[in-house]
Image (cartoon, rainbow, N blue to C red):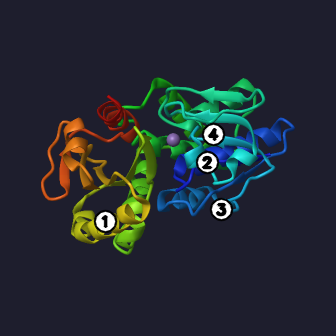
Amino acid sequence: MLVLGHQNPDCDSLCSAIALAALFNKIGRPATPILQGKPNPEALFLLDCAGFEQPEIRTSVAGEDIFIVDYSDWGQGTSDMKKARVRGIVDHHKLGDITTSEPLECWIWPVGCSATIVYNMYKFHEKSPEPAIAKLMMGAIISDTVNFQGPTTTELDKRAAFALAKIAGVDDIKVFAKAQFEAKSDIKNVSAAELILRDQKVFEMAGEKIAIGQLELTSLTVALQKKDEMLVEMRQLQADKGYHSTLVLLTDITTLDTTALIISKDADKVANALNSSVEGNVFELPGVVSRKKQIIPFLQSAFES
Ligand SMILES: [Mn+2]
């Protein structure tokens, strides 16, 4: 069985796939983690910290048994995923559109991170993750919950992360989180084209496609210097893909505020849905850090009403 996260792999997609495959191997269900693409720099930092090799990148899963983590939409899988047998889902997003022809094992909880659910699957099976795996899972929880400051954070996430830190031998989660966040904030040498696609997800609302990327940074200074270059790339992507809107969220994880860049057929509609207003392809979202909880539901109701 192959275990895989979504496109544009982040920490959770990478670490939860590795951790879940390791659990399955412990309970006699042979499994291999794979990736749909190159992991982001923060995920690479975690791999390096834990001393893991990067799983194989595969963009085809036709004919395979698969278990997916951190999504439940066909659109975030490989283009041939409908030709695979989906055996299970671990996720913490809104329910997507995947259906199956056979019963499946589904673990979908409203928590801050898929790794929190995988940790509880270990407990369910009365197994403990190896220290290196525990470190990956802890890092995924720190990432998804923005070190427990994000609005999706639950008690279950905190409990899981602290238990995993203990297994991993990490004495101070805060120190670990700081190094991890610095790794993802280092964007000086990253091209605008690459930045706009980082952590990008495409959402379908009332037949329109809205692409939303997010950069979580300890400071917005360098990103704002690249603003004009990013807008050029976003305009190009928008034209190539026929999106209704292309957004890049620049989220300051120290102040927990977001500045959004937008190219859109109707930028006012998007900004107004989020209680903001656009000025020169930019709008401010104070107190917003979570795309899934503070952005998507509001866009969805504006587009689908
Ligand atoms: Mn996640």
Q: Nearer the viewer, residue 161 or 243?
A: 243
Give the residue number, with chain letter if any, for mark 1: 235
Which amino acid type corresponds to the residue marked 4 in the rendered image? Answer: Ile
Q: CA distance from mark 1 to mark 2?
A: 28 Å
Give the residue number, with chain letter if any, for mark 2: 5
Q: Secondary structure at mark 1?
A: helix
Q: Is mark 4 within 8 Å of ligand 1?
A: no
Q: CA distance from mark 1 to mark 3?
A: 33 Å
Q: Residues within 10 Å of mark 4 (few under 14, many from 20)?
A: some
Which mark is first along the chain, 3 or 1?
A: 3
Q: Please tell me whether mark 4 or mark 1 is closer to you in this view.
A: 1
Circles 1 and 3 in contact, beta carbons < 8 Å: no
Which amino acid type corresponds to the residue marked 3 in the rendered image? Answer: Gln
Q: CA distance from mark 3 to mark 4?
A: 22 Å
Looking at the rendered structure, which numbered label has been put on residue 167? Answer: 4
Q: Please tell me whether mark 1 or mark 2 is closer to you in this view.
A: 1
Which amino acid type corresponds to the residue marked 1 in the rendered image? Answer: Arg
Circles 3 and 4 in contact, beta carbons < 8 Å: no
Circles 3 and 2 in contact, beta carbons < 8 Å: no
Q: CA distance from mark 4 to mark 1?
A: 46 Å
Which mark is first along the chain, 2 or 4?
A: 2
